[in-house]
Image: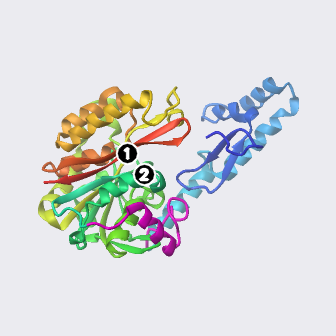
């Protein structure tokens, strides 16, 4: 992203997967050099480019320094990065629990402060709706989307306290057509949520080719963590969850066909559907999903403003998709997602589709829809929805 440091212009680079903790700011005169780190160009090509740009025979030294900084930071696909990645994966696999990755940034890491902010975000507790079988809530920063979180979570009453909450979260970093599972308890400042290991094992045994077991993406992903925090704020820390990260159905969006045309995906959806049918009222479904991502930050040529200009049309298209979801029309919903290869860039499409396929009897209701400027030129849309049989 553009450097936010006023006296250090350039391109800020960081690793969203947290393999590396380094943050680099590439100065403007070196940004063009990054295109040469593609596995095809050589060190000589880098030196030649810098010489053509500067006319200085010693300019190659800057290229050497750039290469060294990228290597040291783990930003090149080389042996140094492979070592860092392997260590991070092993560290997560061996850890006894999934520790909070976003406490202190997405929400307070102090329990007392978190209780205060949750009361602000959620308002006074209500009785919920006994007919609700599940909800869809955002995974955007709660500070920006708490009214939609509230609209969804207010539908969950204390009668659901003993259920297993099946949390379908967007996997922002996982492989397409894959589902990330973990047996680890999800820990937040409230305490440790229990993972339903029996159901994890059942899924892993039935559709192992579609599953990443102890998926490292769990360690950095916020789409499930935020839902666990909200659930614990309502029901207490020792809730029981089945956390599932849903990778994108990339092959279907770009290659055609339906997601379940991939045999491994079909087996996973079948297995999860069998669990849904067998367990029924012992489960409550929670989707951690955002919707459209529009504007400069997301590669569009226009600056997006919430609820204005281009975003008015986006809002209409969002609602068309939500109408299909509410009606349980998975095929109709997916037709809209595949339109223009999902130019709306919905990062919640795979959890929504997964839920619709495994719970075909579910019918939804839109509780609240919002658009939020995540920066001055970019907008994320999201909603709170509830589902009944």
- Circle on res. 90: none
Q: Secondary structure at mark 1?
A: strand
Find out whether the residues at labels 1 and 2 contact each other: C-beta distance under 8 Å. yes
Q: Secondary structure at mark 2?
A: helix
Residue 155 x, y percent position in the rendering: 25, 60
Q: Is residue 56 above or below residue 376?
A: above
Q: Nearer the viewer, residue 88 or 164?
A: 164
Q: Which residue is mark 1?
A: 382
Point 38% across, 62% down: residue: 122
Q: Is residue 26 above or below residue 89?
A: above
Looking at the rendered image, the quarter that the C terminus falls into is: bottom left
Q: Nearer the viewer, residue 352 or 39?
A: 352
Marked residue nearer the N-terminal end (1 or 2): 2
Looking at the rendered image, the quarter that the N terminus falls into is: top right
Point 28% across, 30% down: residue: 256
Q: Which residue is mark 2?
A: 145
Give the quarter of the image for residue 133: bottom left
Point 40% across, 65% down: residue: 229
Q: Is residue 349 left or right of residue 329?
A: right
Mark 1–mark 2 Cα distance, whole angstroms, equals 8 Å
- Which range of residues does the magenta coloring cover? 97-126
Residue 240 x, y percent position in the rendering: 29, 71
Q: Residue furthest front?
A: 124
């Amino acid at each position: 992203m553009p450097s936010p440091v006023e006296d250090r212009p350039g391109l800020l680079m960081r690793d969203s997967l947290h393999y590396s903790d380094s943050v680099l700011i590439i100065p403007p005169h070196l940004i063009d050099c990054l295109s040469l780190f593609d596995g095809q160009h050589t060190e000589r090509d880098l030196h030649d480019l810098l010489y053509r740009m500067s006319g200085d025979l010693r300019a190659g030294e800057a290229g050497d320094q750039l290469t060294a900084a990228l290597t040291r930071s783990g930003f090149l696909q080389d042996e140094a990065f492979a070592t860092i990645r392997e260590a991070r994966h092993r560290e997560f696999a061996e850890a006894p629990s999934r520790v909070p990755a976003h406490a202190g940034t997405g929400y307070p890491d102090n329990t007392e402060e978190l209780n205060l902010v949750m009361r602000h975000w959620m308002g006074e507790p209500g009785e919920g709706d006994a007919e609700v079988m599940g909800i869809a809530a955002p995974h955007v920063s709660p500070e920006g989307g708490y009214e939609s979180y509230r609209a969804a979570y207010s539908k969950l009453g204390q009668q659901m306290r003993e259920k297993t909450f099946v949390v379908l979260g967007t996997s922002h970093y996982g492989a397409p057509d894959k589902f990330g599972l973990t047996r680890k308890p999800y820990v937040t400042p409230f305490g440790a949520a229990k993972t339903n290991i029996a159901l994890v094992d059942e899924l892993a045994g039935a559709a192992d080719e579609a599953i990443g077991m102890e998926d490292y993406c769990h360690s950095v992903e916020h789409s499930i963590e935020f839902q666990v925090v909200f659930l614990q704020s309502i029901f207490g820390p020792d809730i029981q969850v089945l956390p599932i990260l849903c990778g994108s159905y990339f092959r279907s969006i770009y290659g055609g066909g339906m997601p379940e045309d991939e045999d491994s995906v079909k087996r996973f959806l079948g297995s999860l559907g069998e669990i849904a049918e067998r367990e029924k009222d012992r489960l409550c479904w929670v989707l951690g999903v955002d919707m459209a991502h529009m504007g400069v930050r997301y590669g569009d040529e226009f600056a997006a403003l919430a609820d204005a200009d281009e975003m008015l049309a986006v809002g209409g298209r969002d609602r068309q998709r939500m109408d299909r979801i509410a009606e349980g029309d998975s095929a109709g919903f997916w037709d809209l997602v595949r339109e223009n290869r999902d130019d709306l860039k919905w990062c919640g499409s795979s959890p929504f589709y997964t839920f619709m396929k495994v719970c075909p009897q579910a019918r939804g209701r839109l509780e609240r829809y919002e658009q939020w400027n995540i920066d001055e030129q970019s907008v994320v849309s999201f909603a709170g929805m509830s589902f009944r049989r």
